[in-house]
Amino acid sequence: MQKVVFRVKRYIPERGPKSYYEEFEVPFRRGMTVLDGLIYIKENLENTLSIRYSCRMAICGSCGMRINGIEMLACNTQVAELGVPIITVEPMRNFPLLKDLVVNMDEMFIKQRRLKTWLVRRDTEEQDNPTSQYLQSDEELVRYLQFSYCIQCGLCYSACPVVATFPKFYGPQPLMKSYRYIADSRDEGGRERLGLVDTSEGVWRCHFAGSCSKVCPKGVDPALAIQLLRRRVLTS
Ligand code: SF4
Ligand code: FES
């Protein structure tokens, strides 16, 4: 493969409300990622192309997009592994589109905040002036460990068919993150969070399509977290 065609979905608000596809020929090189190709386009062919990225190593979570119809991190997707001469690149779904491949992810973070996705403790005096560590056993750590690998890329949220049809649904990432803290032995905010997710916008709205877990680049299983949340709600 000497060249690869990038078929990029473009949206430039100043030029009108419609999205359109634009094709670019990019020289192929061994080890090239989809993000490398997009950066090549921006630097050499079309400098108005908007993309979001930072770490280039699947850590920061900022380069999520749809590549040939599937949610992926552009920096973590090898062009050679796609095995096709034309690569279609589109922005994530379920987020308002800002420009080209850049979406506004505020809503997902607002939902996280509503679900109090941080360690809640009542001993505020101890937190301000710590006298000891919050110890945790290996078994206690394993209960939430996989859920702490989330890099907040939003791919699961984009892939969720329920968010697509019912935007008030908290969505896989905020619900998973809420479970991550409920399952943490150091946390004391579980009761309040369970009240927040035991609603029609919460765990009961999930249809268990499972697409969230399928697309997660970090091996997190948000669909499992939602099932575990349901169990907590029913047994609490
Ligand atoms: S659960 Fe996975 S897909 Fe969803 S935001 Fe976190 S890292 Fe991304
Ligand atoms: S650029 Fe950071 S995850 Fe892709």
Image (cartoon, helix red, strand yellow):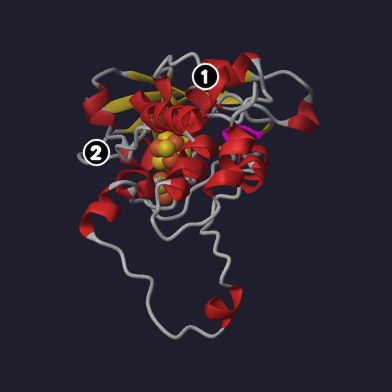
- Point out the tag, 2 or 1, that comes first from the N-terminus: 2
Boundaries of the magenta span: 98-103
Q: Residue 206's mark?
A: 1
Q: Which residue is mark 2?
A: 29
Our reading of the magenta stretch's main secondary structure is strand
Q: Is residue 102 magenta?
A: yes
Would you say residue 62 is visible in this rendering?
yes
| Residue at x 37% of width, y 52% of height | 59
- Residue 164 at x, y percent in the picture: 60, 17
| Residue at x 37% of width, y 35% of height | 34
Residue 151 left/right relative to 3: right
Query: Residue 6: which quarter of the image?
Result: top left
Nearer-the-camera pick, 191 or 143: 191
Nearer-the-camera pick, 46 or 143: 143
- Residue 104 at x, y percent in the picture: 66, 39
Nearer-the-camera pick, 208 or 100: 208
Total number of numbered labels?
A: 2
| Residue at x 58% of width, y 43% of height | 193
Q: Residues within 10 Å of mark 2 (few under 14, many from 20)?
A: some
Would you say residue 90 is visible in this rendering?
no
Asked whether the beta carbons under mark 2 and mark 1 sit within 8 Å of each other, the answer is no
Residue 55 left/right relative to 218: right
The CA span between labels 2 and 1 is 42 Å
Q: Amino acid at mark 1?
A: Cys
Q: Amino acid at mark 2?
A: Arg
- Residue 173 at x, y percent in the picture: 50, 36
Q: Residue 232's mark?
A: none
Q: Given this view, does label 2 or label 1 mark the residue nearer the observer?
A: 1
Nearer-the-camera pick, 4 or 175: 175
Q: Is mark 2 within 8 Å of ligand 2?
A: no
Q: Secondary structure at mark 2?
A: loop
